[in-house]
Protein backbone atom coordinates (compact mmCIF):
# COMPACT_ATOMS: atom_id res chain seq x y z
CA UNK A 1 0.00 0.00 0.00
CA UNK A 2 1.09 3.53 -0.64
CA UNK A 3 -0.57 6.44 1.10
CA UNK A 4 -0.06 10.13 0.58
CA UNK A 5 -0.99 12.18 3.60
CA UNK A 6 -0.67 15.61 5.06
CA UNK A 7 -1.40 16.60 8.61
CA UNK A 8 -1.18 20.03 10.16
CA UNK A 9 -2.45 22.02 13.13
CA UNK A 10 -4.96 24.81 12.61
CA UNK A 11 -4.52 28.15 14.34
CA UNK A 12 -0.75 27.97 14.68
CA UNK A 13 0.12 30.64 12.12
CA UNK A 14 1.22 30.39 8.51
CA UNK A 15 4.71 28.92 9.00
CA UNK A 16 4.27 25.30 10.06
CA UNK A 17 7.70 23.70 9.54
CA UNK A 18 8.31 23.56 13.29
CA UNK A 19 5.24 21.31 13.54
CA UNK A 20 5.99 19.33 10.38
CA UNK A 21 9.63 18.50 11.27
CA UNK A 22 8.77 16.26 14.26
CA UNK A 23 6.19 14.45 12.11
CA UNK A 24 8.82 13.76 9.45
CA UNK A 25 11.11 12.46 12.23
CA UNK A 26 8.34 10.03 13.24
CA UNK A 27 8.03 8.88 9.62
CA UNK A 28 11.81 8.39 9.37
CA UNK A 29 11.80 6.36 12.58
CA UNK A 30 8.90 4.18 11.38
CA UNK A 31 11.15 2.23 9.02
CA UNK A 32 8.62 2.66 6.20
CA UNK A 33 9.80 3.85 2.82
CA UNK A 34 8.72 7.45 2.33
CA UNK A 35 9.04 10.50 0.13
CA UNK A 36 8.36 14.00 1.39
CA UNK A 37 6.80 16.44 -1.06
CA UNK A 38 5.99 20.14 -0.63
CA UNK A 39 2.32 19.29 -0.02
CA UNK A 40 2.52 16.04 1.96
CA UNK A 41 4.36 12.79 2.43
CA UNK A 42 4.03 9.45 0.65
CA UNK A 43 4.63 6.31 2.71
CA UNK A 44 4.70 2.69 1.59
CA UNK A 45 4.24 -0.50 3.56
CA UNK A 46 1.85 -2.93 5.14
CA UNK A 47 -1.61 -1.38 5.57
CA UNK A 48 -1.63 -1.75 9.36
CA UNK A 49 1.76 -0.07 9.71
CA UNK A 50 0.79 2.75 7.34
CA UNK A 51 -2.49 3.43 9.16
CA UNK A 52 -0.79 3.19 12.58
CA UNK A 53 1.82 5.72 11.48
CA UNK A 54 -0.72 8.19 10.12
CA UNK A 55 -2.80 7.85 13.29
CA UNK A 56 0.29 8.43 15.47
CA UNK A 57 1.27 11.53 13.47
CA UNK A 58 -2.24 12.95 13.79
CA UNK A 59 -2.34 12.27 17.54
CA UNK A 60 1.07 13.89 18.07
CA UNK A 61 -0.17 17.14 16.57
CA UNK A 62 -3.48 16.90 18.43
CA UNK A 63 -1.70 16.88 21.80
CA UNK A 64 -0.80 20.55 21.44
CA UNK A 65 -3.52 21.79 19.09
CA UNK A 66 -7.25 22.32 19.44
CA UNK A 67 -7.73 21.42 15.77
CA UNK A 68 -5.75 19.17 13.40
CA UNK A 69 -6.52 18.37 9.78
CA UNK A 70 -5.25 15.16 8.20
CA UNK A 71 -5.89 14.28 4.56
CA UNK A 72 -5.14 10.80 3.20
CA UNK A 73 -5.09 9.27 -0.30
CA UNK A 74 -4.52 5.52 -0.55
CA UNK A 75 -3.47 3.25 -3.41
CA UNK A 76 -3.77 -0.35 -2.22
CA UNK A 77 -2.41 -2.59 -4.98
CA UNK A 78 -1.90 -6.15 -3.70
CA UNK A 79 1.38 -8.00 -4.28
CA UNK A 80 3.27 -4.88 -5.42
CA UNK A 81 6.16 -3.14 -3.73
CA UNK A 82 8.50 -0.20 -4.32
CA UNK A 83 5.63 1.67 -5.90
CA UNK A 84 6.88 5.07 -4.71
CA UNK A 85 9.64 4.80 -7.31
CA UNK A 86 8.24 2.28 -9.79
CA UNK A 87 5.14 4.34 -10.63
CA UNK A 88 7.38 7.24 -11.64
CA UNK A 89 9.80 4.98 -13.51
CA UNK A 90 6.91 3.56 -15.54
CA UNK A 91 5.88 7.03 -16.70
CA UNK A 92 9.51 7.98 -17.42
CA UNK A 93 9.92 4.85 -19.55
CA UNK A 94 6.93 5.83 -21.67
CA UNK A 95 8.18 9.42 -21.97
CA UNK A 96 11.73 8.35 -22.78
CA UNK A 97 13.23 10.71 -20.21
CA UNK A 98 13.40 11.49 -16.49
CA UNK A 99 10.73 13.76 -15.07
CA UNK A 100 11.39 16.68 -12.77
CA UNK A 101 10.96 15.80 -9.09
Image: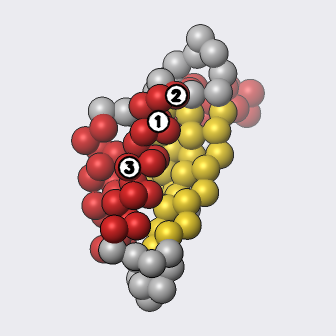
Question: Can residue 35 be seen here?
Answer: no
* Image location of residue 33, percent across then percent down: 40, 33
Q: As drawn, is 26 to the left or to the right of 58?
A: left
User: Residue at horizontal 55%, vertical 60%?
Assistant: 70
* Image location of residue 8, percent across then percent down: 47, 68
Image height check: is 77 above or below 9?
above
Q: Would you call the spot at circle 2 few (<14 residues within 10 Å), some (14-19), or many (20 or more)?
A: some
Task: Label 3: state its secondary structure.
Answer: helix
Question: Can residue 2 be seen here?
Answer: yes
Q: Which mark is residue 70?
A: none
Q: Would you call the spot at circle 1 few (<14 residues within 10 Å), some (14-19), or many (20 or more)?
A: many
The residue that label 2 is drawn on is 47
Image height check: is 37 above or below 90?
below
Colour mapping used in the image: secondary structure
The residue that label 3 is drawn on is 56
Q: Estimate the spatial distance between the alpha carbons at disc 1 and disc 3, rounded to whole Å.
A: 10 Å
User: Residue at horizontal 64%, vertical 39%?
Assistant: 74
Q: Estimate the spatial distance between the alpha carbons at disc 2 and disc 3, rounded to whole Å.
A: 14 Å
Q: As drawn, is 46 to the left or to the right of 3?
A: left
Q: Nearer the viewer, residue 37 or 99?
A: 37
Task: Label 2: state its secondary structure.
Answer: helix
Residue at the farthest right position: 94
The residue that label 1 is drawn on is 50
Task: Label 1: state its secondary structure.
Answer: helix
Q: Nearer the viewer, residue 71 or 87?
A: 71
Q: Indicate which label's residue lies in the foreground, 1 or 3.
A: 3
User: Residue at horizontal 55%, vertical 67%?
Assistant: 69
Q: Earlier in the sequence, mark 1 or mark 3?
A: 1
* Image location of residue 91, percent across then percent down: 69, 32
* Image location of residue 26, percent across then percent down: 29, 49
Q: How many marks?
A: 3
Q: As drawn, is 45 to the left or to the right of 89?
A: left
Amino acid sequence: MIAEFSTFPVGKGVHLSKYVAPIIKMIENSGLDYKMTPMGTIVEGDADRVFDLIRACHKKLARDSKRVITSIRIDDFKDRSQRITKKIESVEKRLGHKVKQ
